[in-house]
Image: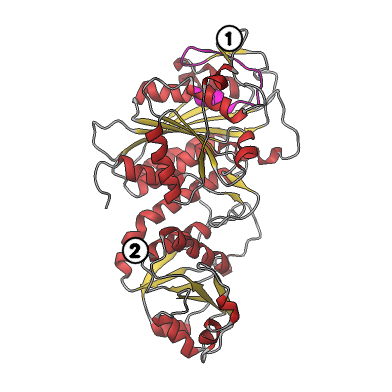
Amino acid sequence: MAQHTPIRFVPVDADALETAQGRVAIMVTPDGKMSVSARRINRLTRGALNRLVESERFAKVKPGDVITMAWPSGMAAEALDVLVIAKNASDIEARKAGAALARLAAGKSVLVSVAGLKRAESLAMGMALRTYEFNVHKTAEDDSAAGEYLVAVAKPEETEAAAAPMLAVAEGVHMTRDLVNEPANVLTTTEFANRLDEMSALGLEVEVLDEAALEKLGMGSLLCVGQGSDSPSKVVVMNWKGGDADDAPLALVGKGVVFDTGGISLKPAGGMEDMTMDMGGAGVVAGTMRALALRKAKANVVGLVGLVENMPSGNAVRPGDVVTSMKGDTIEVINTDAEGRLVLCDVLWYTQERFKPAGIIDLATLTGAIIIGLGHENAGVFSNDDAFCKSFLKAAEAEGEGAWRMPLGKAYDDMLKSRVADMKNVGGRPAGSITAAQFLQRFIKDGTPWIHLDIAGVASVKTATDYAPKGATGWGVAALSRLVQDAYATRDEE
């Protein structure tokens, strides 16, 4: 995995504030009240911190802001970061504050003294999320600046225990980012499957289905997408059995198109290099399953990903071809660049046939149309079950991950009618994200709660976010982990 700065929890040590190298961070409340550590810093710097609090600049700061004082007198540190935050800050506020500190630290050592902060574990999670950098393919990276983050709190062991499941989620997010950032010549379908298979060491039951197995199952829709590529198509099943044996699992299904040229319906050259992220849905499923295994979630969850590469060749599927899905429905392929739904429909059907899940959530970088509608702030959420949808939206809001429910309806479904087959794989330009969801809903059995998440706008972004540098975000791992904890855990998680 990509490198990230380790985090340790240590007791508060006033003397360490004076001698610590790198950066030192302390907290001051928005109304100017100083913690014990801040008061010690104020004495070391001969009242500099007090002058800052009384300045016009401090009067303009907002909660979560960080003011940096370079080379503070009386200290060995190269910088003092003054974090403005209330002692009872919310989880999200503390998390964003930690991310802000990590962004400034940029991998160098930092001592963060936050003994008065009630949610120091959330601050640590924010630091863990923002410490990520994807530089595994850079040959000139200088590792000499690598350090560690020391979080000084009143009760280190208690805070470490509270932070453990959060840091497990952060590791799952990092895995998702690694997969989404990885170039397609490295992350082939085979390499992707191998990386998932390695998670069996965490207690996951991992099974890789090859093309022969998929053909035997009748997955003609999925297989048609990858038939133009030299990379073999695969389906990987990851099963976490942390709940009661009789409980039906929650199922997560991800689109894993490791590179998408558009096939015969070739995409324009400009921006095609970004299509390494078209396996983002599978990446989120993988990262979520890692997080659940690391934190030993007390729930049954199965994750399935369809891994293919969409390439043009003499053997590629053509516009106008008719393929048969595992369900038995026939599909007229109008546009080979609408391939993600062809992958998902077979994996969704297989998931229901084999696991009879309590609910099923699919994730996919499915349509550019969702970016037009929601930008890069929210994923599109489609569902056939109000209660199930509300539980996910609640979890996403709790984790600060943007999600917005979109409509479904018969009129949209009618747009998929085909002259020569049971359905077309596209419904035209209008309501493109909705008709894609309607296509998938045709492969959801009656009575099965289902959510479709179109994450095309949030999986990878061109500018840095609160928690990640530009590139892959890992959106969805935290929300799905929270959903499992809140709605599917069979008993309280330790």
Which quadrant would residue 425 be assigned to in this image?
top right
Looking at the picture, does residue 127 appear above or below residue 419? Answer: below
Q: Give the magenta range.
A: 325-345
Looking at the picture, does residue 259 appear above or below residue 159? Answer: above
Left or right position of 13 against 53: left
Looking at the picture, does residue 427 appear above or below residue 368? Answer: above
Which callout, 1 or 2, points to the residue nearer the camera?
Answer: 1
Position of residue 182 measured from the top left corner of the image (x, y, whole percent): 59, 44
Q: Residue furthest top?
A: 420
Q: Which numbered disc, 1 or 2, marks the residue that appears first in the sequence?
A: 2
Per the rendering, the mark at residue 393 is none
Instruction: Let me know if residue 369 appears in the view.
Output: yes
Residue in view at x 48 percent, y 12 percent: 328
Position of residue 96 measured from the top left corner of the image (x, y, whole percent): 49, 61
Position of residue 220 measured from the top left corner of the image (x, y, whole percent): 53, 16
Q: Which residue is mark 1?
A: 421
Residue in view at x 59 percent, y 38 percent: 456
Q: Residue furthest right?
A: 269
- Three-letter amino acid code at the position of disc 1: Ala
Residue in view at x 40 percent, y 20 percent: 445
Q: Is residue 209 magenta?
A: no
Per the rendering, the mark at residue 160 is 2
Instruction: Let me know if residue 232 appears in the view.
Output: no
Mark 2 packing: few (<14 Cα in 10 Å), some, or many (20+)?
many
Left or right position of 177 against 172: right
Q: Is residue 343 magenta?
A: yes
Mark 1 packing: few (<14 Cα in 10 Å), some, or many (20+)?
some
Label 2 element class = helix
Label 1 element class = loop
Left or right position of 298 against 269: left
- Three-letter amino acid code at the position of disc 2: Glu
Nearer-the-camera pick, 374 or 123: 374
